[in-house]
Image (tube, helix red, strand yellow):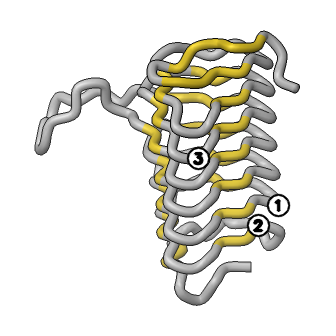
Amino acid sequence: MIHPLADCQCPNIPESTRVWQFCVILPGAQIGEECNICSHCLVENQAVIGNSCTIKSGVQIWDGIELEDEVFVGANVSFTNDKYPHSHCKEWKLLKTKVCKGATIGAGSTILPGLTIGEGAMIGAGSVVTKNVPDGELWVGNPARCISKTVK
């Protein structure tokens, strides 16, 4: 289901994926089966979203961001893909970020560029992730740090 108020330019969105109103999905994006992309989201051309992902409202999935299967992204999470952003900089470097299978990112978190969030990891709401997060760990705070080696 693609809401009629979405600007969905991508021709390859599976029928099992829901795209809500006021989303913009650019033509080169890759989006898997059974996803739920809530209102007011943007998905750029070089973004990859796996199967069964949930992306809550107000999230931008920029070029170079990859979400593997079963990833949950809370409302207003901010991904970044440029370590040193400047307006109109022609020499900027795209840094890729990967969120591995089954990971959860809590609402309002910020994910710095070029990182990997491990399989089954959980990021607490409002956290600022500045380092790679190992599989299955719970990270919270600013800067985010591990508070549990296994997510419960």
Residue where numbered disc 2 is placed: 17
**Whether label 1 touches label 2, CB < 8 Å:** yes
Dividing the picture into quadrants, the one containing residue 63 is top left
- Horizontal side of residue 123 vs 42, given as left or right: right
Q: Quadrant of the N terminus?
A: bottom right
Along the line of sight, the residue nearer the viewer: 24 or 149: 149
Tell me the mark number nearer the camera, choosing from 3 and 1.
Answer: 3
- Vertical position of residue 131 compared to residue 96: above or below: above
Can you give x and y, in whole percent of width and height, for residue 46 in the image?
Answer: 48, 45
Label 1 environment density (alpha carbons within 10 Å; few <14, some 14–19, many ≥20): some
Label 2 Cα crowd, 10 Å radius (few <14 / some 14-19 / many 20+): many
Given the image, on which type of amino acid does mark 1 rest?
A: Glu
Question: What separation in Å lies between label 1 and label 2 (alpha carbons)?
Answer: 4 Å
Q: Position of residue 49 (x, y in %)?
A: 66, 47
At mark 2, the secondary structure is loop
The mark found on residue 34 in the picture is 1
Image quarter hosting the C terminus: top right
> Considering only order in the chain, which callout, 2 or 1, is on the residue closer to the N terminus?
2
User: Label 3: which residue?
Assistant: 107
SS assignment at label 3: loop
User: Which of pointers 3 and 1 lies earlier in the amino acid sequence?
Assistant: 1
As drawn, the residue found furthest toward the left would be: 88
- Residue 14: image quadrant is bottom right
Identify the residue at horizontal 65%, vertical 63% (top origin). Answer: 37
Q: Amino acid at mark 2?
A: Thr
At 80% from the left and 27% from the top, the residue drawn is 120
Disc 3 packing (10 Å; few <14; some 14–19; many ≥20): many
Q: Residue furthest right?
A: 152
Three-letter amino acid code of the residue under disc 3: Ala
Residue at image x 67%, y 79%? 2
- Residue plotted at (78% across, 32% down): 101
Depth order, front residue of 21/30: 21
